[in-house]
Image (cartoon, rainbow, N blue to C red):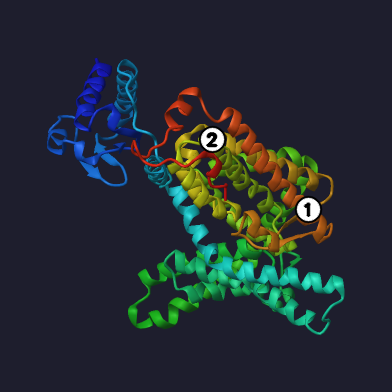
């Protein structure tokens, strides 16, 4: 009986949103049925809102019908089934799918994913990411300077300039814990400078004179993880003080207690704990790629895009930063960058598989330059994800590229990126490794080539069903519009 009720609700909604031919996408979040529409004017708003099961409607990137938790999860599959049944029962010339249709569908998927990512744990990871994102420009600048300094040192050029470049490249990294502490306190609602002050204890050379529990501290022990934990503790101590210390004494007592309590806990606890955690992260990352590099690269490269979509990639940012702090580069980023290569290869395959869909081909041509430079969002949400299967084959391309790079790590040619943020071709100036710059660049370029090729081949042959090709390989231009001759078709950018 419940199924009949849900189907009846779906059947009542369908004609009021313009029928099956007006639907470009169907999705749902916790409470809303999200529908992509070709023609918004066909929606009968008042009649729709009058339906007993409908609590309201919101006109946004997609048309959103509020059905409530539980109900929407049951009505949506019935709605999808009705749309498919109606299209199958009454086949007729369909509206050609354009890049705007896919963009609307991608926007709906992105919004749905954003809402699903708003869990306490993922929101916490996002706040942690917000601590490190402002540091990326400095990491990039100092990383490129470090690479330039390495080239000059190896070539024996400009010996008088090398020490200056070394100071520029290393100065920020020597104090990165302070910046992490400052941003942590700011992000979590404390006084930023107090977070920086507590984190500064970690890099202060004088901690080498401190012995606790029979162990001597080392300047920098705990690194960015210790700074993050210390500053977070400082925020909670400060908030406690603000609640209990009289206002007349607040300006003296609160900052003093914040630095004193947090500082003691940092020196006699957090630096040891975070130091062990940092060492474990570095050891595990190097061991993983040294012993199972090809397989590890395959998993990391193949799953990175889904990881981004569920919001868990943000947990990698402090790990990347820790690896850069320890060894000068993160071995993980070049492998994860292969996911973008798979996307590029898949997009090129879509371009050639759909020669008549000029709208989608134009979108791909405009998004590919950014894709080559590692900016994959236009291709993900504008092309591969709305199409479905090409997103999966793009991940296969990323897995192949990751396996290629991981294999060379396993064979002893370990390398990484001296900064986080850039990807694709933009990562070349930031590469560093133990086997020389020439071999490092060649391996990374080979990984990109493998990602492009496998993403292209798998998408070209397995990225479309026959029905998809029938629906998509159609010129969306109005009948009678001038068509370009095949010989003059613009080349792929």
Say which residue appears at 47% left-offset and 47% top-offset.
362
Q: CA distance from mark 2 to mark 1?
A: 28 Å
User: Crowding at label 2, few (<14), some or many (≥20) Cα neighbours within 10 Å?
Assistant: many
Q: Which residue is mark 1?
A: 442
Q: Which is more toward the observer, 482 or 133?
A: 482
Is residue 268 something that shows in the picture? yes
Q: Secondary structure at mark 2?
A: helix
Relative to the observer, which residue lies in front, 98 or 157?
98
Residue with the mark numbered 2: 390
Q: Is residue 304 above or below residue 97?
A: below
- Where is residue 277, by image quadrant? bottom right
**Measuring 63% from the left and 53% from the top, which residue is drawn there?**
424
Classify residue 276 by image quadrant: bottom right
Judge whether 335 appears above or below 85 on screen. below
Instruction: Tell me the tag on residue 53.
Output: none
Q: Nearer the viewer, residue 485 or 278?
A: 485
- Seen in the image, is 450 located left or right of residue 377? right
Q: Nearer the viewer, residue 339 or 291?
A: 339
- Horizontally, is 479 left or right of 372 in the view? left
Q: Taking 229 as reference, is 457 above or below it?
A: above
For residue 102, what is the image quadrant?
top left
Q: Position of residue 436 (x, y in %)?
A: 83, 60
């Amino acid at each position: 009986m419940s199924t009949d009720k849900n189907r009846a609700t779906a059947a009542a909604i369908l004609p009021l949103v313009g029928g099956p031919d007006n639907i470009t996408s169907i999705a749902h979040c916790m409470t809303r049925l999200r529908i992509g529409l070709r023609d918004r004017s066909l929606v009968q708003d008042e009649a729709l809102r009058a339906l007993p099961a409908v609590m309201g409607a919101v006109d946004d990137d997609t048309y959103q019908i509020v059905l409530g938790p539980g109900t929407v999860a049951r009505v949506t599959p019935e709605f999808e089934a009705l749309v498919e049944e109606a299209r199958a029962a009454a086949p007729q010339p369909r509206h050609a799918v354009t890049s705007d249709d896919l963009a609307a569908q991608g926007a709906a998927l992105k919004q749905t994913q954003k809402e699903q990512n708003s869990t306490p744990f993922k929101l916490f990871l996002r706040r942690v990411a917000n601590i490190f994102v402002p540091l990326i420009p400095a990491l990039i600048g100092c990383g490129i300077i470090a690479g330039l300094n390495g080239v000059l040192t190896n070539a024996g050029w400009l010996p008088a300039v090398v020490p200056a470049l070394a100071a520029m490249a290393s100065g920020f990294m020597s104090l990165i814990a302070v910046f992490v502490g400052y941003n942590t306190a700011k992000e979590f609602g404390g006084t930023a400078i107090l977070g920086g002050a507590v984190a500064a204890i970690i890099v202060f050379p004088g901690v080498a004179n401190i012995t606790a529990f029979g162990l001597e501290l080392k300047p920098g022990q705990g690194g960015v993880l210790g700074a993050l934990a210390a500053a977070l503790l400082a925020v909670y101590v400060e908030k406690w003080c603000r609640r209990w210390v009289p206002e007349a004494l607040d300006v003296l007592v609160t900052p003093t207690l914040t630095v004193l309590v947090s500082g003691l806990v940092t020196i006699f606890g957090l630096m040891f704990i975070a130091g062990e955690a940092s060492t474990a992260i570095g050891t595990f990352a190097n061991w993983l790629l040294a012993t199972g590099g090809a397989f590890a690269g395959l998993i990391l490269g193949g799953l990175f895009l889904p990881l981004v979509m569920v919001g868990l990639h943000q947990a990698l940012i402090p790990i990347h930063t820790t690896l850069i702090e320890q060894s000068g580069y993160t071995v993980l980023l070049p492998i994860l960058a292969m996911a973008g290569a798979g996307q590029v290869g898949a997009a090129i395959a879509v371009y050639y598989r759909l020669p008549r869909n000029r709208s989608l081909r134009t979108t791909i041509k405009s998004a590919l330059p950014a894709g080559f430079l590692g900016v994959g969002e236009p291709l993900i949400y504008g092309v591969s994800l709305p199409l479905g299967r090409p997103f999966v084959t793009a991940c296969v391309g990323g897995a192949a590229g990751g396996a290629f790079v991981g294999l060379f790590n396993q064979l002893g040619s370990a390398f990484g990126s001296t900064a986080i943020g850039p990807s694709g071709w933009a990562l070349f100036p930031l590469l560093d490794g133990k086997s020389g710059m020439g071999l490092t660049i060649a391996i990374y370029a080979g990984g990109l080539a493998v990602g492009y090729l496998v993403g292209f081949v798998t998408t070209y042959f397995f990225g479309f069903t026959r029905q998809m090709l029938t629906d998509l390989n159609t010129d969306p231009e109005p009948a009678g519009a001038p068509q370009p001759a095949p010989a003059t078709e613009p080349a792929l950018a």
